[in-house]
Amino acid sequence: MKKQLISVVVPTYNRKEGIKKCIMSLFKQDYPVYEVIVVDDGSTDGTQEMLEQLKKQYKFRYFRQRNKGPAAARNLGVKKAKGDLIAFTDDDCILYKDWLSELKKKLINKKIVLVGGASTLTRDDSLICKWQIAQKKKHGERFESNNFLILKKAFEEVRGFDTNFAYPGSEDAEMLLRLRLKGYSFERNPKALISHHHRTTFKALLKKAYHYGHGDIIYMINHPDKKLKQSHYFFTIPFLSVRNAFEQSKFALPIYIVPFAILNFLNFVMLYYGRLRQAIRSKRLDLLKYNPDHRLIVEKN
C-alpha cells in the first residue's frame, strides 16, 4: 500500500542552533515519504545564512517572511506543502526517528483529523528546568503545535492558525477549539516522541508567560462563550503561587517549595501583565475578569 506524503512544517525565529539540530533529526525519520518545510519568521541572528548553507546538505524547502509570529509562519508552510498530511514541530525540538510513523498510526478513521504525540524535556541542573519539569508533570500532556499531525483538508477548513496571535501562546489551543466545534476528534499516541529544549533563563520564562497572557485575551475575543469567571484576582497571586508550589513539590524535592513559589509568582505576574497589555490594545478590559476555558480541547473523546 502506497504511503501518504507528509509535509513537516517548522517555523523558526532567532534559534539558528536549535533549528539546525531539529532539521538534522528530521532527516533521520523512518517514515518513507515526507518533505521538510522550514519557514524563517524574519530571523536576525544569522539563521538565514545558516539555513542556506544547510540546504546544500539536507534537501528541505526554505521560505522566509517578515516577522509576523509562528501562526503566520505555519500557515505559510501549509500553503506551500505538497502533502495531504501536515506535521508540525518547532525549532527547539529534536524528533525521535519513528516520530512520523507513530503519529500516522493513529489516523484510523474519518472523524480523527489530528494526532498528538508526547514530549520529554531536555534536562539540566537549573532551577527553572526543575520548575518546568514539575509543571509538565502536574498538568500532563496537551495537544501542542510542536508535536501533532493533521489532515491538510481539516486545517484549511478552519482557515489554519489565527494570525492575530503575534506571539507563541494559545494559538494552537484556539485552532484546536475551532476543529472541535466542527465535530472533529483528536487522538494521542504517547509513542510519537520529541525532545523539547526549553530555554532555562528568567528572561525566557517571563517572556513566555507574557506571550501566553497576550494569547489568552485573543482566545476569549474569538470565543466569547469559552471563558470562565475568575475565582481569583491579581491580589491573590501570592496565595496561588504558594499553593501551586506545594502541588509541584510532589514531583520534586520539598526544598524547592520556596523557589518554586517565587517562580510561580513571577509567572503569574507576567501572565496577567500580558493579558492587561492585550486587553488595553483590544479595548476589552472586561475580559480581565475571566480565564480562557480550554476544557473542550483537553477532554479526550
Image (spheres, rainbow, N blue to C red):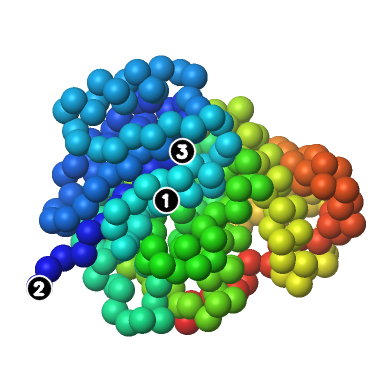
Q: Badge 1 local density, few (<14 within 10 Å), some, or many (20+)?
A: few
Which residue sits at x=29%, y=33%?
Answer: 21
Gap in Å between the C-alphas at discs 3 and 1?
A: 28 Å
Q: Amino acid at mark 3?
A: His
Q: Amino acid at mark 1?
A: Lys
Out of 75 and 96, give the one closest to the viewer.
75
Position of the N terminus by quadrant: bottom left
Label 1 sits on a secondary structure element that is: helix
Out of 250 and 114, give the one closest to the viewer.
114
Query: Which label sits in the foreground, 2 or 1?
Result: 1
Label tally: 3
Q: Which residue is mark 2?
A: 1
Query: Which label sits in the foreground, 3 or 1?
Result: 1
Disc number for residue 79: 1
Q: Amino acid at mark 2?
A: Met
Which residue sits at x=61%, y=27%?
Answer: 203
